[in-house]
Amino acid sequence: MPDFQCPKCGASLQVKPGTQMATCSFCGTVTYIDRRSALFFYLLPFSIDENAAKGIFKRWTAGPAQAKDLESSANITKFAKEFFPVFRFRRTVNGKETVFVKPAKGTLLPGMQDLTIPPGNIVIYDANASTKGADVIQPDIAIDSYLPELTGTPIDQALVYFPIYEIAYTYKGAAYQAVVDGSSGAVYTTSSPTRSSGAYIAVMGLAFTLGLLGGILGIMVSPIFFVLVIAGFFAGKLLAARVVERQKPADAEVKAE
Amino acid sequence: MTEAQKILVSMTCPSCGGQVQCEEGEDLVLCKFCESVFALTTDEGANKVMYKMTVDKDKALAKVRDWWKTGPKAQDLVQTAQVTEAYPMYLPFWRLIARGKACVCGIEEERRGKDNQKVEIPREALINREYIYSEIACETGDLGIQSIVIPERAQAISYDDQEIVTFGVTSSRDNAYEAGGRAIRQTAVEDGGARMDKIYFSKSFFFPKAFTLVYYPFWIVRYSYEGRTYFATVDGITARVVSGRAPGNAGSQSTAAGIGGALSGGLAGFGIGLAIVTEGTDVGIGVLVVGIVAAVALLGYFYNRFRYGDEILEGAVNGKGLKSGRTQKKVQPIYNETYDYFK
Amino acid sequence: MLLKELKCPGCGAPLKSKERDMMLACSHCGRISLFADGTVGDVSYSIAAPAENRSEELIYVPFWIVNADLNVKKESISGGRISRFITDRKQMRGTRDFYVCAAALPEDSCRKWNMDLTLDQPELTFVSGFKGAKRAVMTMEKGIAGENAEFLFLRYETEIPGTLQTLEYDFNINSTKVLYLPAYKINDTYILGISHE
């Protein structure tokens, strides 16, 4: 069992086999043991409580780019307060101190690949740090997986528990995921549901009716009525363009994401 | 096109140190240098192998941009879409190779003669082929990847280290093995009954050869366009866009509505008008029927393009949208060891 | 994934082989063991005597002999009745030894031998050893011999004149054993060295 050194004071760490956390008997720092290295261990507390997060998500479902009845018809199946593990790499790149944040667990959740850790709020993960009310997700990726692709030279490496709200919802039978960042309040999403059929059917119905009238009257009364078919085409196309038009979000909304 | 290939894994001979090539499914291994004989043991009963990622981030993003230019997608995708995430991920797949044999008997129905009489031709078939079944071993949400084809000349290595970013296996090994066996046996019977309209007797057998857990590399790319998020997944070795969602072309959607509605209405109206004017003669009724049928078909096709042209789907993605691209079938035959018989 | 060295169950010496044969012979004590389920164990096998002495090289081909009771309860075949009557084909019914070739020889030879031997049920005399003759590599494991025997029956019912339409049967296996049959390699084909029609 290789010896590990406390990253803060350099003393030798006693690590029980099979565990991944060790407390330094000299300075009390808690470190995370990642196979070959001992990492600083931090936690970023929640800045957004559960109610506020629900509010943020609701506002997103009511947004102009989403299906019109998403807010009312979406059925939330999971709204979990979690700490998601990430690696924070501080490195010197071209003479400047740069921070890289990478997920420490394989995930397909949106937004987890490049989270921002606000430097002021971070807290050392020790006996005092509280994870109450939140599930702690364990890392399953070795930190060495990322080292080859990082630029610059290393300053330090740490494991950080990052606060998130993991959301799963269904809409018309299909399942979707979203994440609310527990520190910044940003909403990360993958695909979301598209609009419902009502307006589409109406538009197509109108064009069809015009065309039908044009066809019947054109044969029975006078060929001039065939022009109704053309009218149906233009009416259909114009109205359809209105239905299909995606709402371009106001600039303010874009910045918040 | 690409025939399914068996995986070859390189290992070191414990006796002499020479390189030993283990073929997927062969648990008796020989070292050609020292002639020692070994049993290939695996933990948890399935080999674990991985394929190294050979596509880099720039190439993956370039392929996604190419994909944006194809098909009925929004015209300004390349200029205005913003990539929000692009990261590599190894996804686990269960892969079962087995020989499927089946005996299928039944009849083929044909219409012959002037009166188009139905004739039954008795048919029998024996199927004897190797099949490969692959299925994703985790919940990928709506990423739209179900099975894989290993590209030719790709080299597998034993997956013992966790030095790669993977998504954990969530489906049970035993379930996957059973599902694979059933799927292969079913495919063997389907292949045997390909020319039959009714099957009277079928019996299938399944001889498993290999069961491997394969970690295959992908790039997951997420991008936003006009306030909505979309994604694309890129094969980490062939660089092909395997699945994805993209916004549709609003212009072609509205045109579809216009043409579909007006034209189908016009055809239906034309048919009805003619039928009334000719006071129900055969020609009139004939045109009416043709008109209605054509109108319904057109209506359906153009409504689909109008309503679901919002999103273009690639691969096995769930949900509504215009589908394009091919979905990878779960069971694929290996053609060079086939001994079929058809009568 | 690990490579575990295989040792002779009789004398403990490491087993060596030039080819991937499931019947592995120990170079020290000469004992033959069967590789199955990741380990080597004892196996009982018989060696059939060649019917006549020939000059070509003798090679013993391994077969799985599946002794089974076949009971056909219902069968209907469309057409071909006269052909079947005229050629007086043997029926594959009742208790018999099903021959399943376990070597990686040309598929056409194996298929023909399996069918002919299973229909003929030849009477064999045995010898006690290989006497230095080569053994063909056994590549088929015991576990699948039974299903291959059943498939052989289905193949027979399908290949006879007429088109099989319905079939109901019971196939119950009594035993599965190894039998080596003598063969001669002439140019690129193999000829069995026992008499059978």
Image: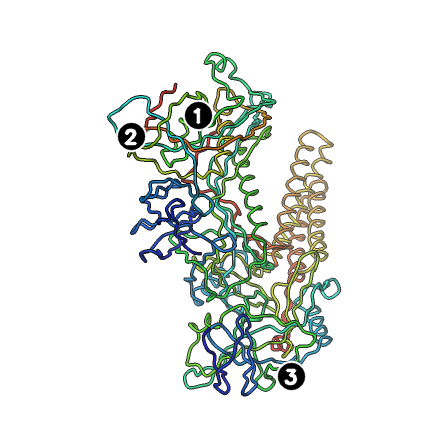
* x then y, percent, for residue B308: 63, 55
Q: From the viewer's side, name the closer residue of B15 and C86.
A: B15
Q: From the viewer's side, name the closer residue of B113 and A47.
A: A47
| Residue B2 in view (yes/no) | no
Q: Residues within 10 Å of mark 2 (few under 14, many from 20)?
A: many
Residue at 66 percent of width and 32 percent of height: B286
Residue at 71 percent of width and 64 percent of height: A76
| Residue B179 in view (yes/no) | yes
Quadrant of the image occupied by residue A54? bottom right
Residue at 71 percent of width and 51 percent of height: A205
Q: Name the residue under label 1.
A: C115
Task: Name the residue type under label 3.
Answer: Asn
Q: Mark 3 points at which residue?
A: A128
Q: Mark 2 points at which residue?
A: C58
Q: From the viewer's side, name the closer residue of C63 and B111.
A: C63
At numbered mark 3, what does the secondary structure look like: helix, strand or loop?
Answer: loop
Q: How crowded is mark 3: few (under 14 residues within 10 Å), some or many (20 or more)?
A: few
Q: Residues under labels 3 and 1: Cα distance?
A: 79 Å
Residue at 63 percent of width and 45 percent of height: B298
At numbered mark 1, what does the secondary structure look like: helix, strand or loop?
Answer: helix
Task: Name the residue type under label 1.
Answer: Met
Task: Name the residue type under label 2.
Answer: Leu
Q: In this view, does C19 lie above or below C129?
A: below
**Label located before the other in sequence (2 or 1):** 2
Q: Are marks 2 and 1 on the same chain?
A: yes
Q: Residues under labels 2 and 3: Cα distance?
A: 82 Å
